[in-house]
Image (tube, rainbow, N blue to C red):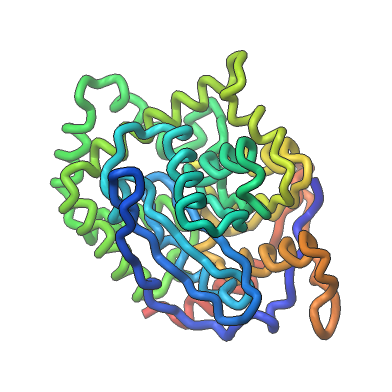
Amino acid sequence: MKPAALWPDHLLPAHHVPPPWPGRNVRLDGTVTYVRDTPATAAGAEPALYVHGLGGSSQNWTDLAGLLADRLDGQAIDLPGFGRSEPGRRYTVPAFAHRVVRWIEHSDRGPVHLFGNSLGGAVTVRVAALRPDLVRTLTLISPALPFLDFRRSLQGRMLPLLAIPRGERLAAWRLAQLAPEVMAQQVMEACIADLTRISEQRRLEAVEEIRVRYEAAHYAAAYVRTFRGLVSSFLRSYLPGSGSLWRLASVVRVPTLVVGGRQDRLVDVRVAPQAARVIPDSRLLLLDGVGHVAQLEVPRTVARAVLALLAEASDAGSPPGGGHAAATRTERPDGQASELIAETGESGRRRDMAG
């Protein structure tokens, strides 16, 4: 493990808030997978695939994919049961990983630069470990890798729901009690440390995403069953056997970037550093003042770390005008390095765009 480097900010596109990238339905193995395409803006771009977290969708990657479009030809999929994809038969980490593998095979774009946030982080770790032939690099943002102290997560409040027979019905009833605007605000407050970084356009899109969930009769069941599958994978990871996500992480060999937010309220903040220690060829970026979805909250900082990873992985050398910027870090009492640029570099820019 080593600290992540940062690509020079002035080499990124000028800041703007792009609309959601175009989406389409693709029938894969008998069900529809919804995919958004972020076309490359430069020749020679390499394929990338973005995988969202629990309750998220392909729309979560709009800003980051746009910033990387001159280097990566991006696609972001909705996992079965989420976003605009049709429901699946099973909602487990292995089942979602199988869908990601099948998508890469179906699209014939592999190997890809693979990105995963939260649940998508657990899914993409499994893909990179078991199908290294399909992965060029791996970027994990607040990966939902196993931890057992659920007091460190707002999701811990959902654990009793898993013990209730037909808990999906209770979840669906709860969803029906809240207006989409209220639910969207609650979701953003749980995932984002500084809401002033989120533009009005992104807020409106979040409300629309909630409306889509309300219209999908399968959504509550998909959410609860996925959460149950994720918790089960956590428990299995501390038992003997080959299915442990931590054991799988230890065999990932592709160059990997791990990003964590110190104000993450959904995944134990100790998970990202642990993931970076376990994955052999890893770089760690810890962000002060950032929550669970750094690609939404501080996309430029994440993009800079990704571009530095890509340059290192391809041995492309230094960018014009100088080498990679070193990550600004501070040492905490626990010995973990903390990245400070996001707090001072993006918050003002995002605030100017809000509203």
Q: Which of 295 and 256 is in front in this view?
A: 256
Question: Which residue appears at 81% of the width and 70% of the height?
Answer: 316
Q: Is residue 90 visible?
A: yes
Between 333 and 248, the one lying in front of the other is 248
Position in image of residue 141 (x %, y %): 57, 52
| x 22%, y 57%: residue | 212
In the picture as drawn, the residue positioned furthest to the top comes out as: 240
Q: Residue at x 26, y 48 (%)?
A: 86
Determine the image quadrant of residue 34.
Answer: bottom left
Pick the residue in front: 339 or 244: 244
Identity of the residue drawn at 34% across and 45% down: 80
Location of residue 149 in the rendering, given as x and y in whole percent from the top left corner? 53, 27
Residue 186 makes an appearance in the image: no
Front residue of 231/51: it is 51
Q: Residue 259: percent from the left, percent from the top?
A: 63, 53
Residue 40 screen position, x and y as percent: 54, 76
Q: Quadrant of the C terminus?
A: bottom left
